[in-house]
Amino acid sequence: MKYYLVIVLYLIGVCSYSQRTLRSGSEAGSSARESTRYEYLLAEAIRIKYLGDLNQAVEFFEKCIEIDKTRAVPYGELAQIYNAKGNSSKAIENAKIAADIEPGNFWYQVGAGYLFMQLNQSEEAISYFERALKADDNAIEVKSLLAGIYSEKGDTQKADSLFRQLEKEGALTEDMFLMMISGLINLGELESAAKRTERLIQNNPSEIRYKALLADIYLEDGKKEKSDSIYNDLIDNDPDNIESQLLYLLNLVYNKEYSDISGFLRNVFESDLVERERKISIANKLLQDSIYLKENDASLEEGLVILEEKYGNDEEVLSLRPAMYELTGREAEARERYEILLRTIKPGFYIKEKLILIYADDRDYEKLYALASGYASENNKSLLGKVYYAIAAMELKKYDIAETELKKALILAGNNDELRVQVLSMMGDLKYRMNDYPGSYDYYEQAIKISPHDPLILNNYAYFLAEGGNDLKRALKMAEEVMTLEGDNETYIDTYAWILYKQGKTRKAYEAMLRIFSVQNERDPEILEHMGFILKKLRRCPEAVKYWREALEKDGTKKYLEEEISKCNKQGR
């Protein structure tokens, strides 16, 4: 509304100025005939403009400029017309010329400043508004606009100076008051901020938000007793006021005083007077508070059920409870809840995304394939959909589908190098599974060109080179670089040891593997398998068999190890 008032005032001011110019006669430097023609064209241009034929008016104003480029009025009028037509660049161009020709003209400065403000070019807007104040230092509206711009830019001292002037003139609105207080808080002048807030409360004694603001300033200033006193008064004076309860609740959360939260939380969530957005904001704040969640998840769950009852078809609201389950380690309940929601909420894109990630984490590739295939089709430009559809297809050995989806994902990644590297490495993995080693190497070469020192890319490429029996020297060099970057990673140590094994450096490979088994807890089946082969090479078959049997127990797909166990047992006999 403020900006609208400024431009209206600008239009009124410029129009009246144009009329005064018409009555003033010829200006110095023009012949009498040129001046008469100029005045005729200017009058005709303004008349046509008010009749609504803006295109013809532009032609007449431009003819005026051809006669005399030193007069501001035609430029000012053109600025108005181009602004009305939505041509910002030409509006700015003409407004600047008008303002620069007559730097003492208040209206031209305001007009140029306003146009720059519309384009969010605050530095230029400030320059012209400051000129306007030099022309009229009592311009309250311009002072308030300047104060607002300074506040947005973080120049709180200049903003506060203007706010003080406006306060003395009795022109400080509630919004300006709050901007002034915010500026003082940013400057760390909490005592001054508190005094201004007290004056704001005097002017608006029934506005409890301002009392809460004062309490928060006291708390920030280390005066917790004063802060608590204000919040307690808010509740004691009007215990049924839901706004008071909401503010009191937020104060308890901020101070991590959770013992009295549940009743207020229930009341706020049940109230029809509190906006949905504020309720969701409070819920999200509590979900992000790990200390609160640790001991109060049951209370929050009760509150979230209340929200679900009030907003039964709201996907954002319905997603809060399963999100809480995830954050509190109740993954199975989260999965079950998302699956229930998916049957009732349409289209449910957010819920599908959450379930896709859960299925992938659970390695439930059948369900991941079914969900991600549909999601990728519904959201043809979703990189997430393509990638996870490809992952599921790859794990289910549907390699043609995986390749098609990854190629689409590569297109969607565009020029984002980080995304391209991830997709290229996945393509390399896929080609390796398809026994297309040259294809795998080609994709990894592309990935390394983009990210030459990425440990994951280097590790995987080195491992695939070793598995293919190609360029073991380069594979070792890459693995050694990975060891310098992340030498404690068990997967990377395994790759390094496996390359040494492939090179015939079995003793060094064994020593590297011992580093894993001295700390490893889960005992990955792939690593167990590799240790078995290394031990077999060292002619320690009984030990090798133990590792292979453990690998088989953990991963039943490694049936080929049964033959290795049989061979080793025969050697042992």
Image (cartoon, rainbow, N blue to C red):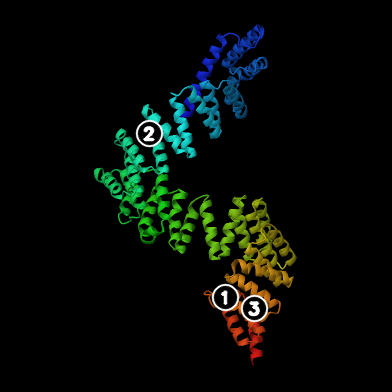
Mark 3 and mark 1 lie on one chain; the one further toward the N terminus is 3
Could you say whether the residue bearing mark 1 is in a helix, strand or loop? helix
Please provide percent x and percent y for residue 4: 48, 27
Quadrant of the rendered image containing residue 333: bottom left
State the mark number for residue 516: 1
Q: Closest to the observer: 346 or 448?
A: 448
Quadrant of the rendered image containing residue 163: top left
Distance from disc 3 to disc 1, alpha carbons, whole Å, reads 11 Å
For disc 3, the marked residue is 509
Q: Is residue 1 visible?
A: no
Above or below: residue 372 compared with residue 132: below
Q: Closest to the observer: 80 or 372?
A: 80
Mark 2 and mark 3 lie on one chain; the one further toward the N terminus is 2
Amino acid type, mark 3: Ala
Quadrant for the C terminus in the image: bottom right
For disc 2, the marked residue is 174
